[in-house]
């Protein structure tokens, strides 16, 4: 009989960092689209969707990388790589999660459903792009950002400038933090013939991350001004700026994984800043 903890680890529930990194942009969008607290039903559907799709994405990634993970120090103990679970068992779990995701998304409107199909296609392609491109993180960013227009559509709002600015932020943020994450696997990935932005930029990865951090700050400032956010948001953004400086210090000291981990807190701080800011504003028709 298979130990339940193997499935738990297959879905990465023992490492909730990735869950938070997918959750925060979703909450940013829900609060911005609804100019404050979204309807409870919508909030529950999207949070459940994040949990289910992130778990499914982890299984899909492990299925695609099962012949590589055993040779990478960081992933050699994953249930598929070490033989705790079979491919068929993992596929059954993936189908179950996919069914749950479908149950959730059919409760939304037609545009949200169509956007979810695009998100699924992006998620399916991501694990295989590491074999042919040094920029799989771009597709990861697109996949992780898709809940943003979905949230606007499900809220009955137009896909406005606010939406697309937040979408651009939602794409660049994973590109930034996943590059830091990939730094840890540079040696193993090079041996296995896998590709990443960290391998492409090599010793200049910290510079690349710094450029993305500056770009993110610019986009957040643009969105903050456009949405007339209050001081709560600007204080949260200031903390993020300090967080980015701290990340650069960590990168210079070869603590790339620690730099990656800090993003789970920075995303939450921004959500709190947006939520508190919107409580003090009157609705903006353009959004």
Image: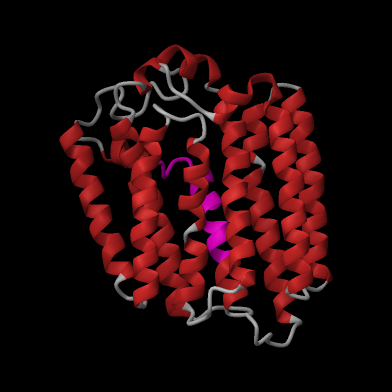
Taking the magenta stretch, the answer to whether it contains residue 212 is: no
| Image quarter in which the C terminus is found | bottom right
Q: Tell me which residue sits at (57%, 30%) in the image.
A: 197
| Image quarter in which the N terminus is found | top left
In the image, residue 195 lies at what x, y percent? 48, 25
Q: Tell me which residue sits at (49%, 51%) in the image.
A: 142
Counting labels gives: 0
Query: From where the camera sits, is residue 11 visible?
Result: no
- Please state if 234 lies on the left or on the right of 255 as rendered: right
Q: Tell me which residue sits at (27%, 64%) in the image.
A: 102
Rendered view: 95 above or below 166: above
In the image, residue 175 lies at what x, y percent? 58, 42
Residue 52 versus residue 171: which sits nearer the camera? Answer: 171
Most common SS among magenta residues: helix
Residue 92 versus residue 224: which sits nearer the camera? Answer: 224
Q: Quarter-wise, where is residue 284 in the image? A: bottom right
In the image, residue 10 lies at what x, y percent? 33, 38
Q: Quarter-wise, where is residue 276 in the image? A: bottom right
Taking the magenta stretch, the answer to whether it contains residue 14 is: yes
Rendered view: 258 above or below 168: above
- Please state if 46 lies on the left or on the right of 234 as rendered: left
The structure's colour scheme is secondary structure
Q: Tell me which residue sits at (79%, 68%) in the image.
A: 232
Q: Quarter-wise, where is residue 59 in the image? A: top left
Rendered view: 25 above or below 186: below
Residue 121 versus residue 97: which sits nearer the camera? Answer: 121
Magenta highlight range: 12-27
Query: From where the camera sits, is residue 212 visible?
Result: yes
- Please state if 237 lies on the left or on the right of 139 as rendered: right
């Amino acid at each position: 009989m298979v130990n339940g903890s193997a499935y738990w680890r297959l879905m990465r529930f023992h490492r909730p960092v990735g869950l938070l990194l997918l959750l925060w942009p979703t909450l940013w969008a829900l609060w911005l689209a609804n100019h404050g607290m979204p309807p409870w039903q919508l909030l529950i559907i999207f949070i459940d969707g994040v949990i289910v799709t992130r778990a499914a994405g982890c299984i899909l990634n492990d299925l695609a990388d099962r012949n590589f993970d055993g040779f990478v120090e960081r992933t050699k103990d994953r249930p598929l790589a070490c033989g705790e679970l079979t491919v068929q068992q993992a596929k059954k779990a993936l189908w179950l999660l996919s069914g749950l995701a479908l149950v959730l998304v059919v409760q939304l409107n037609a545009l949200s459903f169509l956007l979810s199909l695009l998100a699924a296609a992006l998620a399916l392609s991501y694990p295989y792009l590491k074999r042919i491109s040094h920029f799989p993180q771009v597709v990861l960013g697109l996949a992780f950002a898709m809940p943003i227009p979905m949230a606007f559509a499900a809220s009955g709002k137009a896909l406005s400038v606010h939406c697309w600015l937040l979408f651009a932020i939602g794409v660049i943020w994973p590109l930034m933090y996943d590059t830091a994450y990939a730094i840890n696997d540079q040696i193993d990935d090079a041996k296995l013939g896998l590709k990443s932005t960290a391998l492409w930029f090599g010793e200049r990865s910290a510079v690349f991350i710094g450029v993305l951090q500056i770009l993110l700050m610019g986009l957040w400032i643009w969105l903050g001004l456009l949405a007339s956010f209050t001081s709560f948001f600007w204080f949260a953004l200031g903390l993020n700026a300090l967080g980015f400086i701290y990340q650069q210090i960590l990168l210079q000291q070869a603590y790339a994984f620690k730099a990656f981990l800090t993003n789970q807190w920075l995303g939450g701080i921004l959500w709190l800043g947006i939520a508190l800011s919107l409580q003090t504003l009157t609705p903006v028709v353009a959004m």
